[in-house]
Image: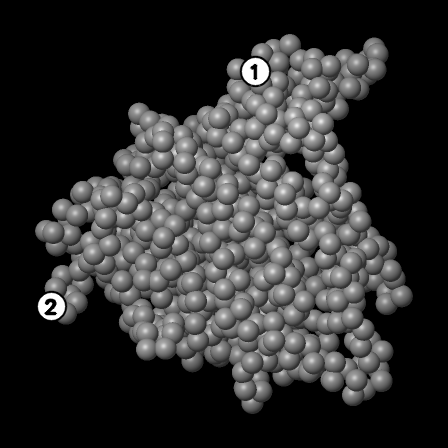
Amino acid sequence: MLNKFITRFLLITLILVGSLKSQSHPLALPDEGMWLPMFVDRLYYTDLQKKGLRLTPEELYSINHSSLKDAVVGLAAGSQPEGYFCTGEIVSEQGLVFTNHHCGYSYIQEHSTLENDILTNGFWAMSFEEELPNPGLTASILVRMEDVTRRVLENVTPDMDEDAREEAISKASEEIKKEASENGKYNCTVKSFFYGNEYYLFVYETYLDVRLVGTPPNSIGKFGGDTDNWMWPRHTGDFSIFRIYTAPDGSPAPYSKDNGPLKPRHFLPISIKGVQKGDYAMIWGFPGSTDRFMTSWGVEQAINETNPTVVKIRDLKLKIMKEDMDADPRINLMYAAKYAQTSNYWKYFIGQTRGLKRLNVAEKKREIEDQFLKWAAQDPERQAKYGDALDLIRQGMRQQAPYAVPQTYLMEAVFQGPEIILFAMRSSGLLDLLTKADKAKGAEKEEINKKITATLDRIQKRAADFYKDYNPATDKKLFAALMQLYYQNVGPEYRPDIFQPLEKKYKGDFNRWAEDLFEKSIFASQEKLNQFLAKPSLKKLEKDPALKIAIEVRTYYMNLIGQNTEAEKIVNKGYRLFVDGLRQMNPNKFYAPDANSTLRMTYGSVLDYYPADAVHYDLMTTLTGVMEKEDPSNPEFVVDPKLKELYEKKDFGRYGVEINGRKDIITCFLSNTDITGGNSGSPIMNADGHLIGLAFDGNWEAMSGDIAFEPNLQRTISVDIRYVLFIIEKLGNCTRLIDELKIIE
């Protein structure tokens, strides 16, 4: 996942794909990789020009002048720039941000009620005053990135063990971040690239007031649902609209009525000229993680163990949620976002396993490993330095292997299973404070009591959000079913002590266990929790069954991690040497670093593809396709009545096109650009840096792409910007937003 980036000549081709192509082409095709924009001028600007780009390097990335990077936003559920769940783009001089509907989904759902269900019906703020705040949602814009490899590794020596090495790196990184933050003005992070061979500093300005401005109805923003997820052809209007607000002086500030719209350094003009096959296309965003240096052993583990385990657990979880959601509209609204989040990567891992098998990725990885071993053996110095790299990885993975499935069950079935466990765990700090207060005296007790009061207040506020979308009866079913799944599929040597009462007290009856827990736990309902918070008791909290499970499981999980620590160090060292050796083995090849939630660009062309023998997929879909898929009996394929009316009248305004003698509108299109999770909502732009769409998905035939890029199959699915504007203007009647944009006709 995390790799290190080389400053010499690096930056253009993924290790797997490059090795599968003809070695006579040292420069990889532009659609292979997620590149750091700071290297655009030095490494691949000429290739960008050949593909059709009409911008200068300074217009793409500059730290002294406004540039395209200043319009790309990382969206996070917190203020620290360590990982972004989605990307957005600034599209007006008043801080308006476009992103995907599924990126805004949980926030849209939080604002929805049965009486005002904006998730189902859509929402359009007709004034600044109607725009809705979203506590916890932040938007970060990159100020600059910098190669700090030399400084980070300054005190690292070859004879250091992994602990000493990590300590030296951590100390240097903290010093660099502290200096770059300018006394807290910026959020800063130092990221590892190429498995610890290089390090880069990223400095962000993080905005804390991000408001919901608009969203289409769910029937447009999520059209096709789980059936169409990861599939082409696609007809989803996957967009939502937010706005960044700042303090009156333009600085980041928490929500306040006194805040005003951001005045950005740069925003993206919008082109409605349309796209054609072969047109230049580029995407900027914050891809989350890829693992394209993964060895054959990692691929086999994913295929045979971890992926099937995740799918099995999530399959059961989805089934239970869906039954209750279908039975009650109130529960359906409560669990809409949770279901979507669970389902997304349930289907992803199914597709990834399929792709890894079908494309024979493990065997191709073994070919690379064989080449590496032969190269190392050709020179004594190389053999001494790199000869053991693959053995280290294999040795460490063998030590880790027994823990892979139990750890997956703990994460998926417990921490991300019944919500009561995680919510109780997040309240465990109160137990520590009450325990200390019970033993403290005088001034110390007084100070602890102040902390207790503050903690009670935080839990109360957190509870209001939690219980709004929580149904105890559903969670009780999840607890019984997921604990039973864990118990039946993980050997007794990897079961935490939480299962002892099941065997002794409940005689193996998981439903009795669940009933008892939910009857006795203060976390089972908001009413019970509020009663406790009004009069907190150490004795009561110590006995709470949900909290006891949470603490026991957390302790058990950390113990498993601890048992894996030495093996993890061995694996990390092996990968560091392996990846470094691969670059030495192919000195004329530019390697792209794995994604790690840092700003990247990927570029290529608008392009169709052939997914299988005698099958061809066109590069665009239309609104006609939406009507063809309509199925009023299936919630995933319901068509909004007003959208249907606009289609029948061919009332497309300036966004319509002529196709085979009929008026229509383009909904989605394809490009051979390289994206992954975190890129959702990313701007896809033309050769002039104008917005032509929003990236929102990959395609089913290339689901193994995070591990092995397949250039002939891998495609990015984007919603066409003309469909977005059509929905805003014609269906939402929100012309104030259209007037705010700079539209290129």
Which residue occupies the extreme front position in the image?
507
> Residue at point 60% right, 67% down?
292
Residue toward you, 414 or 152: 414
Residue toward you, 98 or 226: 226
Does residue 726 show up? yes
> Residue at point 57% right, 66% down?
707
Which residue occupies the extreme right position in the image?
159
> Residue at point 57% right, 38% down?
482
Disc 2 target residue: 661
Color style of the picture: one colour
Instruction: Give residue 528's mark.
Output: 1
Name the residue type under label 2. Answer: Gly
> What quarter of the picture does the N terminus occupy?
bottom right
Percent of width and height locating residue 234? 32, 58
- Earlier-in-chain disc, 1 versus 2: 1
Does residue 261 show up? no
Name the residue type under label 1. Answer: Lys
- Element at badge 1? helix
